[in-house]
Image (cartoon, grey):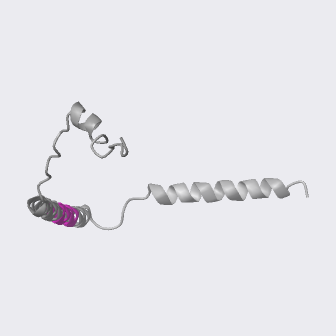
Amino acid sequence: MTRGDQRDRDRAKAQKKLLEKQRSQGKDGRPEERNANDSAALAAKIEAKKKMKEAQAEQDRQAAEREQAKAAVQKKKTKKKDEGLDDLLNAGLAGSKKKGK
């Protein structure tokens, strides 16, 4: 029973070594084929990004048009007449007449 732990450690070490050996092996296929596949994948990726940029530009353009249309529809705001201090003070005095005198 004393070798039980050692066996487990040896198995783990062997599995790790086997995994590293598999990783270090070369890629499958010829380099020309891999290069062609990689370039095709890169071209597809670039095309997808280009389409995404075009779609984003279209959305931005439409948003700008909506903002312009919204700005054209808005009503003009009228300025309130600035009341002077005398007008504000006299506002409450006009209706207060004493009756009976």
Quadrant where the N terminus lies? bottom right
Give the residue displayed 38% in from the left and 59% down from the top.
26
Our reading of the magenta stretch's main secondary structure is: helix
Give the residue displayed 17% in from the left and 46% down from the top.
80
Residue 54 magenta: yes
| 97 or 88, nearer to the observer | 97
Q: Position of residue 92 (x, y in %)?
A: 31, 42
| 30 or 49, nearer to the observer | 49
Quadrant where the C terminus lies? top left
Count of labels shown?
A: 0
Q: Residue furthest top?
A: 85
Q: Position of residue 29 (x, y in %)?
A: 31, 68
| 14 or 45, nearer to the observer | 45
Residue 82 picture quarter: top left
Left or right side of 72 for 17? right
Left or right side of 64 for 31? right
Q: Position of residue 23 (x, y in %)?
A: 47, 57
Residue 31 picture quarter: bottom left
Left or right side of 96 for 21? right
- Above or below for 100 versus 89: below
What is the span of residues highlighted in magenta in the rendered image? 44-57
Residue 75 picture quarter: bottom left
Give the residue displayed 72% in from the left and 55% down from the top.
10
- Above or below for 54 versus 24: below
- Above or below for 83 versus 75: above
Residue 32 magenta: no
Give the residue displayed 8% in from the left and 60% down from the top.
72
Q: Where is residue 35 in the image (x, y as percent from the top left)?
A: 22, 61
Left or right side of 80 for 101? right
Q: Residue furthest right?
A: 1
